[in-house]
Amino acid sequence: MPLTSNTNPNNSSAPPREQDVPMLLQEITGLPLEISLHPPQEPLLSANSGGPRPDFVLIARWESSEHLFLVEYKSSSTPKALEAAIQQARRSAEAGPFLPMVVVPYLSPRALDRLRQETVSGIDLSGNYLIIVPGKWFIRSTGAKNRYPAGASIKNVYRGTSSLVARVFFARSAFPSVQGVLNEILSRGGTLTLPTVSKALKGLEEDLLVGRGEVIRVLQPDRLLEVLLENYRAPAVGRRVRIKVADLEGTLRRFARNTRESDVYVAGDLPSRYVVLPTTDYVTRVYTSSVEAVTEGVEFEKYPRFPNVELVEVEDQTVYFDPDEEDGFPWISALQTYLLLASGGKREQEAAAQIRPDLIAASGGTDRGVGGEPG
């Protein structure tokens, strides 16, 4: 439901302060209940003397019914913050005849589903809510846009170079340290710094996709794959050049040698390496960061009537990360192939589904071990 005002007490998209919550809740329109928010004081909490104190007490009235909710407020809307709020609200409510409720800046449809699973009510400061009184009330409203994006999410760690941190968990499911994650990324052709890896891991941890204990381990490989796909954007293409070569295998090996000598990227794109995908196009697509460098010394016919190689100039290093080398030439990884196909048309999406189980198994099932690393 919409809000009656676009006024933010902080005059920004920063998360609201706790003292502003009562006023912001009163701005929510369309709620078929009369609600009032109160400080956690007596006599409202007389039956809660043995439990932890909530942030607020909310009284909800509908016709002749009235129910009291103990409210846990979090200024962050990340899954980790939501889980903490759910558990704290439940602990508070267990000590008396109260119901648990959380209040956060934003509740996504997935977050509302999570609240329903736990039978915990929730209201956000953007206009979405779920009110549950078991056996009596079930009121849900979703679709309001996030008014506090800066308070609900950090920098997107699932897109661009930062996504290499998430992607590396599909090559190896656990690491002994942040340095171990960085070393693995570097060994697979990525270029990142330790602070960037640490920041990205924090984002993954906030989203409950990676956990840190004795090791750094992926927790939800299926969900991590979904999030990578949701955030995937096709790489920007500089230009495309179609050529014809007499010896395809020899040319590909020469491409690889040229890139090693000139410090540029190259990787072939051949979905049939991973999936059954019928095609009548016998042109091999090759990504490279420099067409001139990769074709140095290679004999080819340019703009032929029947090309057999398409050179696609792309700078984005995620395309070249964790290549699968065969006969001296690198091919894009199964993960990158999956993302390309799954973001395509219906036929491509059906083909991508063939790769998904192996990716999830590699990340959450088959662990290649937690080895040591330098330093």
Image: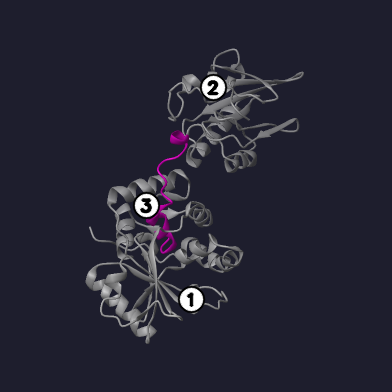
User: Disc 3 versus disc 1: distance between alpha carbons?
Assistant: 27 Å
Mark with earlier residue (2, 1): 2
**Could you tell me if the residues under marks 2 and 3 are in contact, i.e. CB atoms within 8 Å?**
no
Decide: few, some or many residues near mark 1? Use Cα within 10 Å; few <14, some 14-19, many ≥20. Answer: some
Of residues 18 and 294, the one nearer the viewer is: 294
User: What sort of colour scheme is used for the picture?
Assistant: one colour
Q: Residues within 10 Å of mark 3 (few under 14, many from 20)?
A: many
Residue type at numbered disc 1: Arg
What residue does disc 1 label? 273
Q: Position of residue 16 (x, y in %)?
A: 46, 26
Q: Is residue 162 above or below residue 188?
A: above
Q: Amino acid at mark 2?
A: Leu
Residue at the spot of label 2: 24
- Toward which corner of the image does residue 38 lie, by quadrant? top right
Q: According to the image, label 3 marks what residue?
A: 162
Query: Which residues are the magenta region?
Result: 149-173
Q: First in sequence: mark 3 or mark 1?
A: 3
Q: Under tag 2, what secondary structure? A: helix
Inter-mark Cα distance, 2 to 1? 55 Å
Q: Position of residue 195 (x, y in %)?
A: 29, 47
> Which residue is at a point 62% across and 42% down the rendered structure image?
113
Q: Nearer the viewer, residue 373 or 43?
A: 373
Separation (CA) of disc 2 from disc 3:
35 Å
Looking at the rendered structure, the kind of residue marked 3 is Ser
Q: Nearer the viewer, residue 122 or 335?
A: 335
